[in-house]
Amino acid sequence: DVKVTQSSRYLVKRTGEKVFLECVQDMDHENMFWYRQDPGLGLRLIYFSYDVKMKEKGDIPEGYSVSREKKERFSLILESASTNQTSMYLCASRRETGTGNQPQHFGDGTRLSIL
Amino acid sequence: AQSVTQLDSHVSVSEGTPVLLRCNYSSSYSPSLFWYVQHPNKGLQLLLKYTSAATLVKGINGFEAEFKKSETSFHLTKPSAHMSDAAEYFCVVSGGMEYGNKLVFGAGTILRVKS
């Protein structure tokens, strides 16, 4: 089974801090994704990466950056945390086939609170 | 325009009765379709996927879904609900000419199971 592991289940940080959310997958998947999930807004794509050192903006990249130095690890960075970034963050990975027909596999999420 | 519509935001059933969660999508082609389930404070778990093989797809935990191209629907069903089925369910579309590598999520349906 695919395993996607997010480093923290719960995290509390202060405004202005630089925050790192880490995600590791063990299936050698090419694609990795970061979403945030908010009540009434569903899942929204922040950034995704097709392969190592590659990244593309999703629908809501403002205030975030990402890093993919190794294939198995995809990090989400909040450059200067703000209270409106309090949310549930979900990481996912997927095997690349060029057709979009493979499912994404999700981690358990990190519930981030910015005070 | 790309869209996925889950027709009910909340569904309530009694334990042992059938479950129907409805999903319609917009597409001129045959995309890939998925159903995910999310239990409280957990990530999304893949229930089943349709990728242009058999139109009736069987998934985990007794769920199945039928792809109907003429109706652009992909409704999720289960003959007999169990208390453990209480969760939020997401219909997701990907692939094809319109969606490509992008996943488009429905807004979710919360399933409540009464004893």
Image (spheres, rainbow, N blue to C red):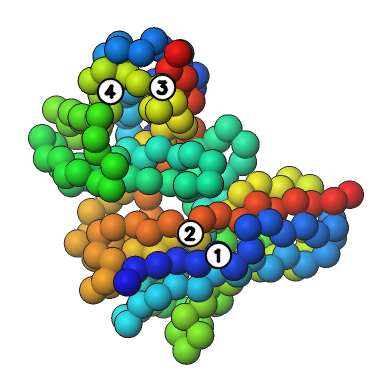
Labels 1 & 4 near each other (Cβ < 8 A): no
- Residue identifier under label 3: A83
Judging from the image, mark 1 belongs to the subunit labelled: B
The circle on residue B6 is: 1
Q: Is residue B52 left or right of residue B98?
A: right
Q: Quadrant of residue A13?
A: top left
Please report the residue visible at 28 percent of the width from the left and 62 percent of the height from the top.
Answer: A100
Q: Amino acid at mark 3?
A: Thr
Q: Looking at the image, is mark 4 or mark 3 nearer the viewer?
A: 3
Judging from the image, mark 4 belongs to the subunit labelled: A
How far apart marks 3 and 1 lie (CA) works out to 30 Å
The crowding category of the residue bearing disc 4, from other C-alpha atoms within 10 Å (few below 14, some 14 to 19, many at least 20), is some
Q: Amino acid at mark 2?
A: Gly
User: In the image, are marks 2 and 4 on the same chain?
Assistant: no
Q: Is residue A46 visible?
A: yes
User: In the image, are marks 1 and 4 on the same chain?
Assistant: no
Q: Amino acid at mark 1?
A: Gln
Q: Is residue B33 left or right of residue B61?
A: left
Out of B36 and B63, give the one closest to the viewer: B36
Labels 2 & 4 near each other (Cβ < 8 A): no
- Residue identifier under label 2: B106
Q: Quadrant of the N terminus of chain A?
A: top left
The circle on residue A78 is: 4
Labels 1 & 2 near each other (Cβ < 8 A): yes
